[in-house]
Image (cartoon, rainbow, N blue to C red):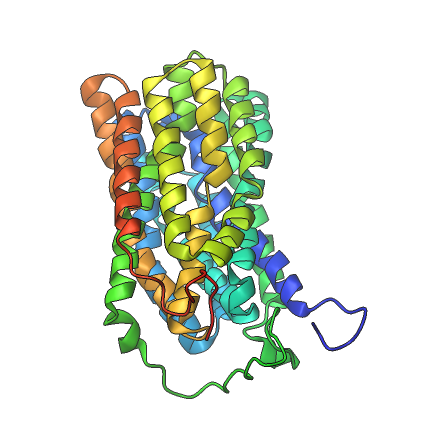
Amino acid sequence: MSGRAGYIHYGWVVLAIGTLVVFGSLGLARFGYSMVLPAMQTGLGMDNTEAGALATANLVGYLALSVIGGALASRFGPRVVIALGLGVAGVAMALTGFAHSFIAAAAWRAVTGVGSGASNVPVMGLLAAWFAPRRRGLAAGIGVAGSSLALILLGPVTPRILAGYGEMGWRVFWFGLGGVTVLLAGLGFLVLRNAPREVGLRPVGSGPMDSSPPAPSGRLEWGTVYRSGAVWHLGLVYVAFGFSYIIYVTFFVKCLIAEGGYSAQAAGGLFMVMGWCSLLCGLIWGTVSDVIGRKWALVMVYLVHAVAFGLFGLWPVPTGFTLSAVLFGLSAWSIPAIMAAACGDMVGPRLTPTALGFVTLFFGIGQALGPTVAGAMGDAIGSLLPSMILASGVALLGAVGAALLRPIVGEDGGGHAHK
């Protein structure tokens, strides 16, 4: 509550803009590549290994800034870091459209990743500061829906751009996405605020018995994050998501066209279906994690992912592809949402960006390895479908690792977070 009847708590405004930040930093900057990959491969003469390496370059850039971005946000405040990072991502996306070689494209994709890491990690941590523990999973779940909005938009729009501009289509695609992302960076700088206390509010969902948030001190105990065994375990579980889902998303459209016989329009249509199915997945699973606990919510989502990836690789017909897309969509971005909420439970709102950045280091390692391994497997075997089976196995390992987590500090026995 804002304390005034009829007024919307500013935390919901922060959540809305935060969702648009995710839309730009991940939805456009990362998943846009999945839709335009076949055209870029043709335009730059890349094989599957190089296509995977191009995705890896982006993810290495993301990895490089994910930890630093979270720490900088804890020190200087998320607002400036988010805006600068998103601006860098937008400019680099536009410059990708000027690339005439694999090396140039890889360089700009890496810089795009740097900007994404500097904006996405802090914005998820920012939501933990604006929402009380009992609402944290819900807020993170809504925030990650920004990626779903991008899939819904890119699915039908990308084939039209590619068809309308011919050989220049993929370049025009990156020019447009870069421009939109720069505009979102400016909006974020104007609207976001670092904490509820900046506007005289308490976090959304704070009860009358909750203590007031402490004033920030000049010193942050970052070492408590990096020495926490629970945070390390959470990070290792996160590796499985990074490795498995990025293989699936990166080569989703390529597999449908090259091995499923889909047209670009039909593949884009299924990409859009996946986006619609994923629209509420973070909200649903974030709320589930508020009720049953982060640990068991993670186990359930990893199992759904294992089935989705396995269906794609083992049942390569329209029915199998569609079931796979729907299952993945229903759970797609839920793991990052649960991870953000779990970090808030473990270390508190002010250190959440640091903890989230640290576990994202593990996630980023998995992401960086996934596309290159999958692309090399595809070139060696002559099919990308076995890579989907590999992704399924790794997701299953993630479920096992999550099942071995101790109860998250900050949750009671019923799964409800508390401080």
Question: Which residue is nearer to you in this view: 136 or 134?
Answer: 134
Q: Position of residue 365 (x, y in %)?
A: 26, 49
Q: Residue at x 32, y 45 (%)?
A: 242
User: Which of the 4 image quarters holds residue 33?
Assistant: top left
Task: Give the left or right position of residue 404, taking residue 185 as reference.
Answer: left
Q: Position of residue 308 (x, y in %)?
A: 39, 30
Task: Give the left or right position of residue 233, taking residue 277 as reference.
Answer: left
Task: Give the left or right position of residue 349, taking residue 231 as reference.
Answer: right
Task: Give the left or right position of residue 43, taking residue 185 as reference.
Answer: left
Q: Residue furthest right?
A: 6
Task: Classify 111 as above or below 275.
Answer: below
- Res. 364 in view: no
User: Where's the N terminus, which quadrant?
Assistant: bottom right
- Res. 187 in view: yes
Task: Classify 374 as above or below 3.
Answer: above
Q: Residue at x 48, y 22 (%)?
A: 322
Question: Which residue is nearer to you in this view: 371 or 409?
Answer: 409
User: Which of the 4 image quarters holds residue 398?
Assistant: top left
Q: Residue at x 61, y 75 (%)?
A: 207
